[in-house]
Image: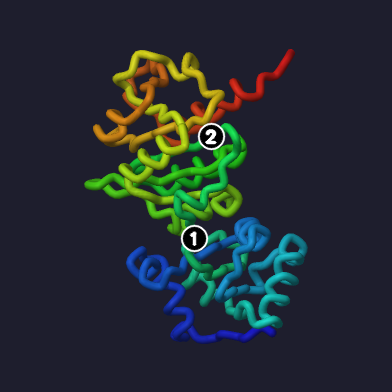
């Protein structure tokens, strides 16, 4: 059953709008998923929305057919509430404009370090203090494509870091945030967790002399990357098993964080899965 909402002043609409603010997200432990592909990936990976909002005039009925069936089923069993809204209401709620007429409100989903599923020779990306949701979303997409075991966010003590539950992270990841395991933990905790499991920490820094292509990435490895503005903290640099550098020959002193992560992750893929020509 779909419950119609026709007023911009509806209390539910106002509550969804508040989730655009991190303080309100953290207080409610809820965030927003927008877009048909992103919503489908959330549902396919076991996420059950507390609320779902659809705007029929904005929906592609063919692309969203399966999604609508699932949402209707969840509503009928009482697992979720399903609402139908007008275009003006949807525009007010949507974090971004091109959401395809689907918006889910879902509970926070991050894992603890202990909950990360690890393979025999895990490959992890650890991001300290990344500032931009778009970068984090792109890293999640790349980590998923590279078959990494997970992505760990290690917020900088002074500078913080990107909120994994930011709706822009979810959109930029195209839903990969639901397909690859993520965890958030302080630097000291991450360092201890890696050491306990025998996972080598490979830290990227412009001060290193060993190029990333010369470092063995076949065993259990965590690729440690810092923010574009500040790099890695002294704590990470001191704890790393090896320092590596991505050579740069131009005048710009740093690469985009997501590009650097992609280079490192796919170097690990190259080493682990050589292609015989």
Label 1 CA crowd tier, 10 Å (few <14, some 14–19, many 20+): few
* Left or right of residue 273, residue 61 in this image: right
In the rendered image, which residue does mark 1 sit on?
A: 96
The quadrant in which the C terminus is found is: top right
Left or right placement of residue 276 versus residue 186 in this view: right
Viewer-proximal residue among 31 and 55: 31
Classify mark 1: helix, strand or loop. Answer: loop
Residue at 54% across, 63% down: 33
Total numbered labels placed on residues in the image = 2
Residue 78 lies in what quarter of the image?
A: bottom right
Please give the name of the residue rendered at 36% of the width and 63% of the height, measured from the top-left corner.
Answer: 22
Q: Tell me the colour scheme of the image.
A: rainbow
Left or right of residue 140: residue 64: right
Q: Is residue 141 visible?
A: no
Q: Residue furthest left?
A: 158
Task: Name the disc covering residue 123, or none.
Answer: 2
Q: Residues within 10 Å of mark 2 (few under 14, many from 20)?
A: many
Which one is closest to the eye, mark 1 or mark 2?
2
The answer to whether 152 appears left or right of 174 in the picture is left
In the image, residue 47 sits, relative to residue 2, either above or below, namely: above
Task: Work out which residue is located at the far front of the displayed protein and give it.
Answer: 196
Q: Which mark is residue 209?
A: none
Q: Who comes first in sequence, dot 1 or dot 2?
A: 1
Q: Position of residue 19 (x, y in %)?
A: 42, 69
Viewer-nearest residue: 106 or 53: 106
| Residue at (54% x, 26% y) in the render | 219
Q: Position of residue 106 (x, y in %)?
A: 53, 68
Quarter location, residue 212? top left
- Residue, x 47% and y 37% (percent of image)? 197
Comparing 17 with 31, the one in front is: 31
1 and 2 marks in contact (CB < 8 Å)? no
Kind of element beneath mark 2: strand
């Amino acid at each position: 059953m779909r419950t119609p909402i026709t007023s911009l002043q509806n209390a539910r609409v106002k509550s969804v709008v508040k989730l655009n603010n991190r303080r309100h997200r953290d207080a409610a432990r809820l965030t927003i998923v927008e877009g048909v592909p992103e919503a489908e990936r959330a549902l396919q990976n076991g996420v059950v929305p507390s609320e779902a909002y659809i705007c029929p005039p904005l929906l592609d009925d063919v692309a969203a057919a399966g999604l609508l069936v699932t949402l209707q089923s969840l509503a009928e069993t009482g697992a979720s509430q399903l609402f139908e809204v007008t275009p003006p209401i949807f525009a007010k709620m949507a974090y971004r404009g091109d959401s395809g007429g689907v918006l889910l409100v879902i509970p926070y989903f991050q894992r603890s370090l202990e909950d990360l599923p690890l393979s025999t020779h895990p490959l992890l990306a650890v991001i300290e203090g990344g500032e931009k949701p778009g970068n984090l979303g792109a890293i999640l997409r790349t980590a998923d494509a590279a078959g990494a075991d997970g992505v760990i966010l290690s917020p900088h003590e002074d500078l913080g870091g990107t909120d994994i539950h930011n709706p822009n992270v979810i959109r930029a990841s195209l839903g990969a945030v639901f397909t690859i395991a993520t965890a958030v933990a302080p630097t000291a905790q991450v360092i201890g967790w890696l050491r306990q499991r025998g996972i080598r920490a490979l830290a990227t820094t412009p001060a290193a002399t060993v190029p990333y292509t010369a470092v063995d990435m076949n065993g259990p490895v965590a690729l440690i990357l810092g923010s574009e503005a500040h790099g890695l903290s002294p704590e990470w640099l001191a704890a790393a098993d090896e320092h590596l550098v991505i050579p740069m020959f131009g005048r710009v002193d740093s690469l985009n964080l997501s590009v650097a992560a992609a280079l490192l992750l796919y170097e690990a893929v190259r080493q682990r899965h050589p292609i015989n020509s």
